[in-house]
Every structure is written in structure tokens, then in C-alpha cells.
Amino acid sequence: MYEVVIASLGFFARRLVVAALIVSVAPVADRLGGLDLALHVAQAGDDDGGDDDGDDGGGGGRGGFSDRSGDDVRRSGRSLGPGFLRTLRDRFRPRGSGRRAVAAAPLPTRVANEIVAIGLTDENTRALEAAGFTVEDRQALSIGGSIALIRTPDGSNLDEAIVAFRTAAPGANADFNHYYRPNQDAVECSGNHCVAPQLVGWPNAAPDAASCSGEGLTLGLIDTAINPDHATFSHGRLEVVRLSDDALPESNRQHGTAVAALLVGAADSKTPGLLPNARLIAVDAFHRGERRDDRAEAFDLIRALDHLASRDVDVINLSLAGPENALLKDMVRQLSEKGIVLVAAAGNNGPRAAPSYPAAYDEVIAVTAVDRRKRSYRRAGQGDHIDIAAPGVDVWTAASVSGARPKTGTSFAAPFVASAAALARQNAVPDVAVHLTNAAEDLGEPGKDPVFGWGLLNARGLCGS
């Protein structure tokens, strides 16, 4: 009965009816000590469980990467006891009228019972197994050696476990199996969304644009799942490799599809890429976590970097961020020594946040985001490690199923710099990072500063010389 009545009402009327039902039913449930009421009003009401594109079913809440508490009303309905009803009643309580909302617990930064290591010997392995550790997986690396995934002893504290690990295997390079996440925020559509390439003087409109299309270049991307059937990839220059465990839920496709389209979207599509004739090898190293967030473990991220190194890519775009990791740092150093240019998003944790990695490593070009007025994106990370700025607010790119929408975040600024770096490599520029930062348009304080780095990317002059 509730469903029929609520379904016939408008959005705000539905909210009021749901609130009234909750407030009226909750005291009864409280007195009955947990009456098992199967309330399905969520089916007729508004749903916060969609993705950030509005074109996929399911997803991770508005924005696609948001963290939702376990007390959400799901489409499937829910048995409601007194505690659950009180939670919903508080959700509709006017601000200032009662208890404060409890902030959601932060997302985990590392796998609870795993360590990753490079350089394990047979002697190390025997010593670790004697100490209660288990080698769950070991993968050969193209750069030499192998990376191992180690399960810690049952019941052990992870911080204590890694100390014990390093004691048992002193010659190995080991660290936690950290999580890395994409950098995207949800935005609403407003204004002209085609200004981003012009903001940095992208040369696609120049008479010699054909020489700037990326022909002959191979780009690498590590990101979430991608929709290869999107019209923007109809030219067949996208290759997707899934490295994450197939037993784990696939990550959402919004982020990866949008970033890939910015790089190599077809020139004749509604979302043309910066280098439409380049080849893109995209490694999906992510999976959907139990908190409905998309995450890549350090173990898979390092394997993904190694895979791209073995494919002779010119540039790798990393629109993701996470903690510092000793093994990741070593892999970044080795790839840089091989001449591969790495470009990473600065992160969206705010200007006062600690530096995000891999962007904060010296060998990586760290990219922050600005809007069409060249103002710093309010949630972009800041610090001495920031190298350069690029458009990252309301950037028009592919949605996950079809069509397009604006995207915001340092994730979407990184492809501009990665594409520029690829053109510079094609023109045999000896030091790509120095070339791009020297040519940047100075913003903020004179010279390099922690907000804009050396300034806004200037792509003029990258072609034909």
C-alpha cells in the first residue's frame, strides 16, 4: 500500500511521506523490541545507488566512488529493527534538532592481512613459512625478479607482522599491500564544456593537426574497468588488459572510460581524444571493494606497471592515488630509468592533505587541476611535489555506456599532460618534464609554487618541430 501511494507522488512529496512513516513507525518498533517490518519504500522513492553518469545500473552512489554506510535503504528492501529505524529517523531529523550525524569511517588504506615483497630467495621463503607466513602468489617481472603476495600469520597485527617479515627475510624489499583509488568528483553540467583543450592551446585545430594526432605513439593507462564498446573507441585503437583477480567484482567503468576517451577518443566522435590516432594499452588493475569503492592493490599496480613496461609504451597515465609504498617507489624509479614518462594525478583529498603517490615521487610528473578561469580546483592536493596544472574541472568526456558528460578531478587533468608528454617524446625532446614545465604559463606566485607547480600546461609548439 505504501509503495502505490508513494510512487504516485513527486520527488519532494515522496521524501516527506517517507520521513513521516519513519518517524511514526520507529517508536512502535522501539516499544516492541525490534518488530521485523519489511519496509520497501525505497523502491518507490528516490535512489542514491546509481552511478555518476546516470547511464549505468547500480554503481557506487552518486559520484560513482562515494562511500555509503551499511545503513542505506537498498532497492531490495530491508528488515527494520529499532536501531535501523532510529538511524533512518535521524536521517530526516531537521538539522540542529537532535543527535549529530556520525561521519562514515574512512576507507581502508591497505589489505588487512597481506604484505608484498620483491627479491625473495628460497631461503627467505623457508624462513617466512617457518614464522607462519604464507606465499599466496608470485609473479615474474619483465624488469627482472618477481613480486610475491604474502599472507601474514593468523591473528597477527599487520604492523608487527611486517617487522617480523623483515627480520625473517632481511634481503627482500617489502611493504604493505596498499590500496590506490581513482581521483574523480561528481559535477553537474553547466556552461561550455569544450574549452579545456583550447585553454592549454592544444594543437588539434592547427593546420598541421594531422602530425599532432598521436600516430605511431603507444600510451599506457592504469585505471578502472573501461567500456570498450563506447562509440568513442570505434576506431579500434584501445586494448584493455584486466590484471585484477577475476574472482573479485569488476570495478565501475565510469572513471576508466572517461580517462581513456580523453586520451584516444575517436576524432569523429562526440568525445574526441587529445591523441585520437595513438594506440592505448589500458590495464584494469582495480576491483570493487566491500565498501563500494574502486581500489587497486599495490601488488596489482606494480604488476600493471611492469606489464606496460614490457609493451614498450612511451608514456603511462596514472589517474589514481594512494599511500607511499617502497615497492612502488622502486618500480617507478626503474621505469623512469628505462625512459618511460610517468604522469600522475595529484589527488583530490584537499590542499592540506599529505602528498599522494605515485604523484609525489620525484620521477613522476605530478598534475593538479584548474578550472576554465585558471583557478585552482578547490580539492586538489598541494605541495612542493606539484609540477604542472591542466584543465580538470567540468572536462567534457565519455560517459560509461554512451554519450558524454562533464567530469571533475585531478584524474582528468593528468591525460592532458600525458598526451603532451607523448608528443614531446615523439619530437625527441631530451627531458620531457623540463620541457613541459619550462613552457608552462606561470600561475599564482612567480615561479614554482605548491598550488600550480610551474603553471598551466602550454601545448603550443609541441608539433611540427
Image: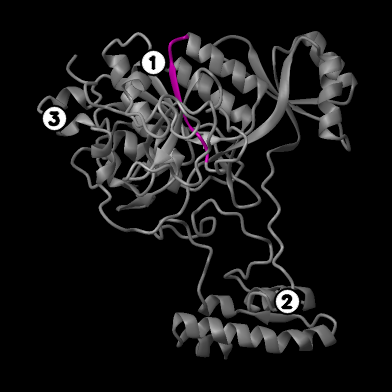
Type of amino acid under label 1: Val
**Mark 3 vs mark 1: in front:** 1
Cβ–Cβ under 8 Å for marks 3 and 1: no
Q: Which residue is mark 3?
A: 206
Q: Position of residue 404 (x, y in %)?
A: 31, 52
Type of amino acid under label 3: Ala
- Residue 152: image quadrant is top right
Quadrant in which the N terminus is drawn: bottom right
Q: Position of residue 227 (x, y in %)?
A: 39, 44
Q: Residue furthest front?
A: 446
In magenta, the rendered stretch is 338-347
Query: Which tag, 2 or 3, sits closer to the chain's start?
Result: 2
Residue sitting at 51 percent across and 46 percent down? 379
Q: CA distance from mark 2 to mark 1?
A: 56 Å
Say above or below: 341 vs 123: below
Query: Which tag, 3 or 1, sits closer to the chain's start?
Result: 3
Quadrant in which the C terminus is drawn: top left
Q: CA distance from mark 2 to mark 3?
A: 61 Å
Q: Which residue is mark 1?
A: 434
Say above or below: 408 vs 420: below
* Residue 344 among those drawn in magenta: yes
Q: Which residue is mark 2?
A: 98
User: Can residue 141 be spotted in the picture?
Assistant: yes
Say above or below: 344 vs 362: below
User: Can residue 399 be spotted in the picture?
Assistant: no
Cβ–Cβ under 8 Å for marks 2 and 3: no
SS of the residue under disc 1:
helix
Structural crowding at the residue carrying mark 3, measured as other residues with C-alpha within 10 Å and reported as few (<14), some (14–19) or many (≥20): few
**Most foreground residue, 442 or 16:** 442
* Residue 75 among those drawn in magenta: no
Q: Residue 57 shows which numbered tag?
A: none
Structural crowding at the residue carrying mark 2, measured as other residues with C-alpha within 10 Å and reported as few (<14), some (14–19) or many (≥20): few
